[in-house]
Amino acid sequence: MNMRESQFNPEQFSKAVLELTVRNHPGVMSHVSGLFARRAFNVEGILCMPVGDGAQSIIWLLVREDERLPQMVSQVAKLEDVLSVARHGADHRVFERLEAFFA
Amino acid sequence: MKYTGAQLVVRLLEQQGITTVAGIPGGAALPLYDALAERGTIRHVLARHEQGAGFIAQGMARATGKAAVCIASSGPGATNLVTAIADAKLDSIPLVCITGQVPLSMIGTDAFQEVDTYGISIPVTKHNYLVRNVADLLQVIPEAFRLAESGRPGPVWIDIPKDVQMASIEIDTLPQPGRPDAAPAVDMDELRRAAELINAAKSPVLYLGGGIVTAGASAQAVMLAEQAGLPTTMTLMALGTMPSDHPLSLGMLGMHGARFTNYILEESDLLIVLGARFDDRAIGKAEQFCPNAAIVHVDIDAAELGKIKRPHVGIHGDVSQVLERLLPLIQVQLRKPWLTRVSELRSRHPLLMPGLENPRSHYGLIDAVASALDPKHADDAIITTDVGQHQMWVAQAYPFTRPRQCLTSGGLGTMGFGMPAALGAAIAEPDRTVICFSGDGSFMMNIQELATMADENANVKIILMNNQSLGMVHQQQDMFYKRRLFAVDYQRRSDFVRIAQGFGIEACDLDTAEDPRAMLADALNHHGPCLIHCSIDVEAKVLPIVPPGASNIEMIGG
């Protein structure tokens, strides 16, 4: 992750928000973050919370919108513990609302 | 019925049809080994290094297409497996790898022989598990086999803490064994578009990858080629899917493909890519590969469609099912003008194989081995290779005639693959002769498995091409680093004949043979392990060669 860049130059690149529904168990964060790291795709922000009865979690990722993103989405979708992937525009409010905590 | 976790694992392996596993025991795997001993139903091949066990399992899986199992203990046992598992991942080979782990309560304490197997295995597996509860085994073991064999196959790693192996559970019935998922439905609109492109193309080329082997689609692929008049090239992983003597076969493409093959590809107006992934060694510089060709790409892994080259038609599906539906839509074409041009390029830029008549030279030895096999059984033989110059010479020159005949480390390019993989193939298919072409560099990376081979009395013939050097590095230092040869030639000559004999393996030396062809025929055509040594010239090159980073038509030599 490269938080500094996202704080200082938030408008320099177009962003996308990915919403992953995943099986909630120790290790699923490693699977997701490791995939982005080893394919050299930067993650600007990451957020994860269990949902419902705790069997599943939602992982929110703030990423750069570039020509490699569809490939990353395909690769993420292949992870066995990732149940679904939804792609939102940068206008999605999940990270926006958190900005107060990073001021 | 009451089981311990370890007993449950053994029962579930039996249900999957596993009759042989390869591995090495150790502290954290002892309950599992005790359960194997107690039950007595599964044969265990005791390797001498866990990487050897991993490649023995790979040999079984590659020869049969079914998931094979390797087992190791925690810590170094697990880390030693990593290379063989990564190799299986890159070549999409179904494996289930089971390791012992320190007890749950000790995880995270830097306990003796503790390593983060789960974390280490993530990037080299299709999926992995750390089993935290004995009841989870009921779901994890069948699911591991299902995943290993479904879609694009791959290795699945199951890490089982020792206390989970020892915990007991009461169950009435065992779960059903894991079976591969059904393939995704084929998009008929895309399929029709593919057929239109193929029917309208002027200079199409069929490009087959390892997916053809996995899907068992080689007969259909050959039918497509014949029906539509398609000259056909194969990746390293696909060699044998079209017989090498087929008139439409162009052999292997890419870095060490024949000149004519790469030139024909350059002139194509349509590439039909089946179960291949546009690997850099196959396509060279991606932007300059087949600049005038439209692309039809079929793959079981949706993420491969558009990963390197954007296809005009991309079809996500099992290539055998796709071909079944595609073939009726394909017009019969003689394609005279294009096939005439193909023959012209073939005769103008053939693959040169200097020294073919000399069985004590690189190409000549490969040819002599193929000719020395009893013709009745020559097609049955399995050929494994290690990695390096000898691997490319075999890929260029060996007359492969069927899928699963050529077992080689394609994606990861792991030296040390050949001999243990040959052993695994011989264990899985005991009626076949298994020939392992190796080089001295590769051979020494898993040479300890000669002892396992002697234990098993496996029908493996090792053809050792000895140039006392890391030949492919030698070649590249010579060609691309101003011949500054460094850290590449071995200073002392190892006596491989005596080493093999020391492990209890018969050995012979072509260097001193009066009649090398007779020696070869004798060694190849009687049962049991044998090492056949032959010195080759360290200056011999694999040609042509596309320099790293160049486009495929910028070949040197050949």
Image: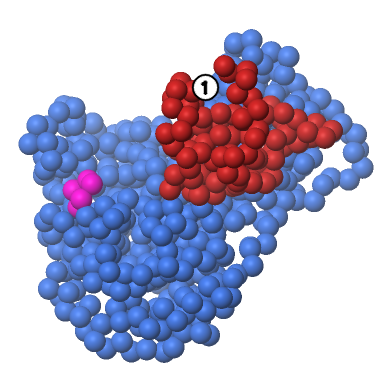
Q: Is residue B505 visible?
A: no
- Judge left or right: residue B326 versus residue B180: left
Q: Residue at x 29, y 78 (%)?
A: B203
Above or below for B210 versus B111: below
Q: Quadrant of residue B255?
A: bottom left
Q: In the image, residue A97 lies at what x, y percent?
A: 65, 28
- Judge left or right: residue B20 versus residue B202: right
Secondary structure of the residue carrying numbered label 1: helix
Q: Which chain is blue?
A: B
Q: Residues within 10 Å of mark 1 (few under 14, many from 20)?
A: some
Q: Is residue B198 visible?
A: yes
Magenta part, dominant SS: loop
Q: Quadrant of residue B115?
A: top right
- Judge left or right: residue B141 versus residue B75: right
The image quadrant where one finds the N terminus of chain B is top right
Q: Tag count in the figure?
A: 1
Above or below for A48 versus B335: above
Q: In the image, residue A102 lies at what x, y percent?
A: 58, 18
Scheme of image coloration: by chain
What colour is chain A? red
Q: Mark 1 — residue? A: B76
**Magenta stretch in the rendered image:** B546-550
**Chain ID, mark 1:** B
Q: Residue at x 60, y 46 (%)?
A: A87
Q: Which residue type carries mark 1? A: Pro
For the residue pair B439 and B205, the one nearer the viewer reads as: B205
The image quadrant where one finds the C terminus of chain B is bottom left
- Judge left or right: residue B315 versus residue B177: left
The question of residue B184 being in magenta is answered with no
Q: Residue at x 62, y 30 (%)?
A: A95
Q: In the image, residue B132 lies at what x, y percent?
A: 75, 27
For the residue pair B78 and B359, the one nearer the viewer reads as: B78
